[in-house]
Image (tube, helix red, strand yellow):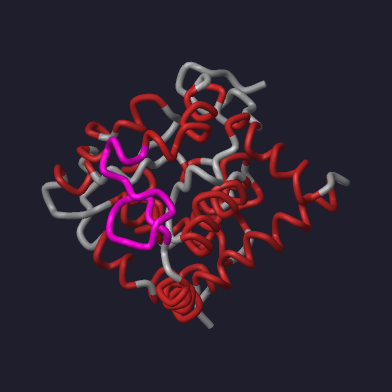
Amino acid sequence: MKNIILQKLDEDVRTEESLSSCMSCGVCTAICPAAEFYKYDPRVICTTVQSRDVAEIEKLLKSDVIWYCGQCMSCKTRCPRGNAPGGLITVLRRISQELGYFVESEKGRQQLAIERTVGQNIVKHGYCVSPDLVRPELHPEQGPNWKWFRRNIKEVAPKFGAVYNEEKAGSLRKINEKDLDELREIFNVTGGTDLYNQIENCSAEVAEKLQIPFEDDYFMKVYTEDNGTHTKDSHQV
């Protein structure tokens, strides 16, 4: 019987679309913005997947490495053979989530924060980022901007063409329930809802093992955690 990891790789059409003739030239790594700063080498990832070495691929799925990619797809534009390591990364991330391996790494555990913010924003409100749901205290890099914008949104939004919370065409409009129900059904049919539940369940298990309250404390832990070892100029502690 084929190993489950190899089976999932082979079943995902994006695997073949992203990686069919890699010759390990390293152009993807040379052009990759993430590789400039992180301990990240897309060429090595492609070589590892092509090797079909289950143990090494499993290490990837449990590592921080597959979460460093910014999905800019610069790799695809420069690959002499038309490969897309960034696309392959999306497959590896999906498998890591489905098999629960994402909780084995610091960056992987942060998928809970992404799912609860961007992911749930889409499902509940139809937006990746909704100003009504942004918690300013989680974005100190913005200074007072978010607080000010939320306080003055009704006055400010029309000035840049937005129709805040109104049921008519325009940015920041209120998405009607019929459209939201259709969007949620798309998530249900395509497996998105199941994946969200998997991220929640696996994360809850980790929180229980750590004896950390799951609903808010664990979220803040994964949202803010940084062991300082991810960039090239950092050192393992």
Q: Where's residue 21, x and y in %?
A: 20, 59
Q: Which residues are magenta?
A: 157-174
Q: Where's residue 209, x and y in %?
A: 85, 51
From this view, report whether residue 78 is shown above or below residue 90: above
Q: Where's residue 11, x and y in %?
A: 39, 76
Residue at 52% of width from left, 19% of height from top? 143
Q: Residue furthest front?
A: 155
Nearer-the-camera pick, 14 or 9 = 14
Q: Is residue 7 visible?
A: no
Residue at 43% of width from left, 69% of height from top? 176
Residue at 34% of width from left, 50% of height from top? 163
The answer to whether residue 166 is left or right of residue 83 is right
From this view, report whether residue 49 is shown above or below residue 213: below
Q: Where's residue 234, x and y in %?
A: 53, 18
Residue 40 in magenta? no
Residue at 15% of width from left, 54% of height from top? 82
The answer to whether residue 186 is left or right of residue 171 is right
The answer to whether residue 98 is left or right of residue 189 is right
Q: Residue furthest left?
A: 80
